[in-house]
Amino acid sequence: MLRLPYFALTGVFALLRLLPTSSTDKDIEIVVLRHQLAILQRHVPKSRLTGPDRAFLAALLHRIPRPTLRTFHLIVSPDTILRWHRNLLRRRHAKTSQPKRPGRPPTIRSIQALILRLACENPNWGYRRIHGELAGLAIKLAPSTVWEILRTNNIDPAPRRDQQTWATFLRGQAHAILAADFLETRTLTGARLFVFAVIEHTTRRIRILGTTPHPTAAWTTQQARNLIMDLHDASATAVRYLIRDRDSKYTTAFDAVLTDSGVTPIKTGIRMPRMNAIIERWIRTCRTELLRPDPHPESSAPTTRPTRIRVVLQPALAAPRTPRRSTLTSTIATDHRTGPTPSSQHPKT
């Protein structure tokens, strides 16, 4: 870019030098320069011009009429020089009219605030309804712009905005939620047993209600009664919901016992274990840890996680056919109905 000002400055000095020169001397110099140019063109078939060269020639010669320009002995044709001049003007106008920020101009902040207010105060309105309300206020805006503003501010579409999500329900009602599920395990003899466990969402306290090789409807109903008795003994009156899957082991009588006590059973979706993720995660931990061998079988102190899980589960797995169960929780306690449980000999987990 420095070459173009250099050409312009040298051209001014050349013009000042030609002012005192007579017309005859100028004509002779023009003839000599033309002859030198013809000699150079015979040796150089095609010259390569840079951007400043084109700009300098176009700035000097664009005002000369085309018939006169055709009489000049130039290295390029007159049409080429005029094309250079048109390109310079086109670039200048394109640079002048180019916006400062690329893309569509942003929406005014007051309109964005109005869109967010309409969406928050009217949860059942979609982006097209909001666009229609804005059109009634003489605010011209595309529906896609309204949708983009809502999406940028993490506002869900209308069908889901006015409904409570499952995650929000769990966080707001954690103190009143229990989750129940069956853990299937096998003994050393190969017998298959089903362990019925309940977990509290707030404290993550585990209640092992019982084990049986055949979880019948009567047995499951009795476990529901035992659970209600444990909740009353622990003064857990805030429990209102129990999450369970759609297993056939949960009968109508099981739900009736819970409903009569003020606990509402909530069924998870079909093949959706994530809706009962807390108890499912604990069951997976039990299955993983129980398959590992005990690194210290003779040690009295349960120093490892697999040992702690065995302390909770082994007393329940030892006598699956007992008529009255022993309450086994993650904080092994004394049952006021049957006396000290066999697992009370172990330290608290």
Image: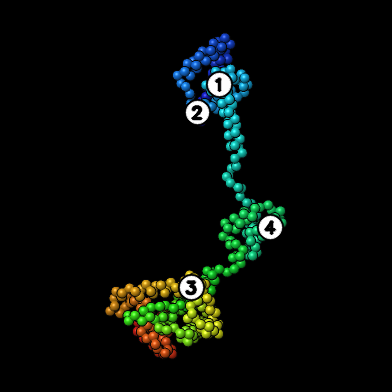
Residue 324 appears left or right of 102: left
Marks 3/4: CA–CA distance:
41 Å
Secondary structure of the residue carrying tag 3 is: helix
In the rendered view, tell whether residue 3 sits above or below residue 171.
Answer: above
Mark closest to the chain's N terminus, 3 or 4: 4
Q: Quadrant of residue 126?
A: bottom right
Q: Residues within 10 Å of mark 3 (few under 14, many from 20)?
A: some
| Amino acid identity at mark 1 | Val
Residue 345 appears left or right of 85: left
Q: Nearer the viewer, mark 2 or mark 1?
A: 2
Residue at the (66%, 52%) spot, across then down:
141
Q: Which residue is mark 2?
A: 50
Q: Quadrant of residue 168?
A: bottom right
Q: Which residue is mark 3?
A: 276
Secondary structure of the residue carrying tag 1 is: helix
Which label sits on residue 132? 4
How far from the left and from the top, in percent, is residue 103?
Answer: 58, 46
Q: Could you say which is closer to the camera, residue 157 or residue 251?
A: 251
In the rendered view, tell whether residue 252 sits above or below residue 40.
Answer: below
In the rendered view, tell whether residue 306 sits above or below residue 342.
Answer: above
| Amino acid identity at mark 4 | Gly
Residue at the (61%, 57%) spot, across then down:
147
Mark closest to the chain's N terminus, 3 or 2: 2
Which label sits on residue 12? 1
Residue at the (42%, 74%) spot, across then down:
283
Mark closest to the chain's N terminus, 2 or 1: 1
Q: Nearer the viewer, mark 4 or mark 1?
A: 4
